[in-house]
Image: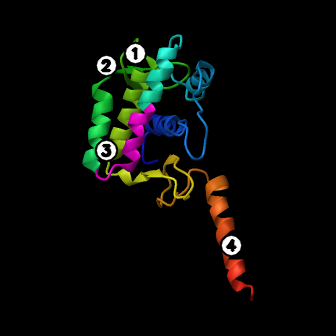
């Protein structure tokens, strides 16, 4: 494992958050408080109070601010974005053990709003990736009609598609059909 369990968990949250934005591939996936609540539950985001429309708007703003990290031209530019994320939210690193999880570090301040919590957790995970010289693992899907992001955690850095079953398979089938057409005398 290249990154700690907590970092990988937060990176999965980053990807899911960014990919929840309406795009060429998907509709809005965080369109209401119910969807936001499911997101919080799916990613086991702890210490979240009652969600409001203000939380939803703040999370929408946050995901738009995280996406540029995946397309940053340099480590320096990616670091600027990440530093902006973690500097704007209250940060109070502390050890905690809860809900059956072993001791781990929470970076967000107690009582932080959901967007602040996510900015700090996601920002710190991205900071670990950049500080370890692994920013090339932060990618955008290579399918020409997809703009979803991914974190390549494979040993050989070979992950090219956000989902091999959809984007990857679709491109492989298209390439196969093109080869077959080229082989067929016409």
Image coloring type: rainbow
Residue 15 place in picture, x, y as percent: 50, 40
Q: Secondary structure at mark 1?
A: loop
Magenta residue span: 63-74
Residue 58 place in picture, x, y as percent: 44, 22
- The span from disc 2 to disc 1 (Cα, nearest Å) is 7 Å
Q: Residue at x 51, y 23 (%)?
A: 45
- The span from disc 2 to disc 3 (Cα, nearest Å) is 20 Å
Q: Which mark is residue 78?
A: 3
- Answer few, some or many: residues within 10 Å of disc 3's Cα (few below 14, many 20 plus, some between 14 and 19): many
Q: Are marks 4 and 1 in contact (CB under 8 Å)?
A: no
Q: Are marks 2 and 1 in contact (CB under 8 Å)?
A: yes
Q: Earlier in the sequence, mark 2 or mark 3?
A: 3
Residue 25 visible in the displayed image: yes
- Answer few, some or many: residues within 10 Å of disc 4's Cα (few below 14, many 20 plus, some between 14 and 19): few
- The span from disc 4 to disc 1 (Cα, nearest Å) is 51 Å
Q: Which mark is residue 112?
A: 1
Q: Are marks 2 and 4 in contact (CB under 8 Å)?
A: no
Give the residue pinned by disc 2: 90
Q: Is residue 27 above or below residue 52?
A: below
- The span from disc 1 to disc 3 (Cα, nearest Å) is 24 Å
Q: Residue at x 55, y 19 (%)?
A: 99
Q: Secondary structure at mark 4?
A: helix
Residue 150 place in picture, x, y as percent: 50, 48
Q: Secondary structure at mark 2?
A: loop
């Amino acid at each position: 494992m290249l990154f700690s369990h907590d970092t990988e968990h937060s990176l999965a949250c980053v990807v899911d958050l960014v990919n929840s934005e309406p795009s060429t591939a998907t509709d809005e996936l965080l369109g209401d408080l119910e969807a936001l609540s499911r997101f919080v539950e799916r990613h086991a985001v702890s210490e979240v109070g009652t969600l409001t429309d203000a939380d939803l708007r703040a999370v929408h703003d946050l995901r738009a601010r995280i996406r540029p990290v995946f397309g940053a031209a340099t480590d320096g530019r990616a670091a600027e974005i990440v530093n902006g994320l973690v500097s704007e939210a209250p940060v109070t690193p502390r050890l905690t053990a809860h809900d059956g999880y072993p001791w781990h570090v929470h970076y967000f301040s107690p009582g932080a709003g959901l967007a602040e919590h996510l900015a700090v957790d996601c920002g710190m995970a991205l900071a670990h990736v950049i500080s370890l010289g692994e920013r090339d693992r932060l990618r955008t899907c290579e399918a020409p009609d997809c703009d979803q992001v991914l974190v390549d955690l494979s040993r050989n850095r070979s992950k090219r598609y956000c989902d091999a079953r959809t984007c990857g398979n679709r491109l492989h089938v298209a390439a196969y059909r093109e080869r077959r057409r080229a082989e067929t005398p016409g």
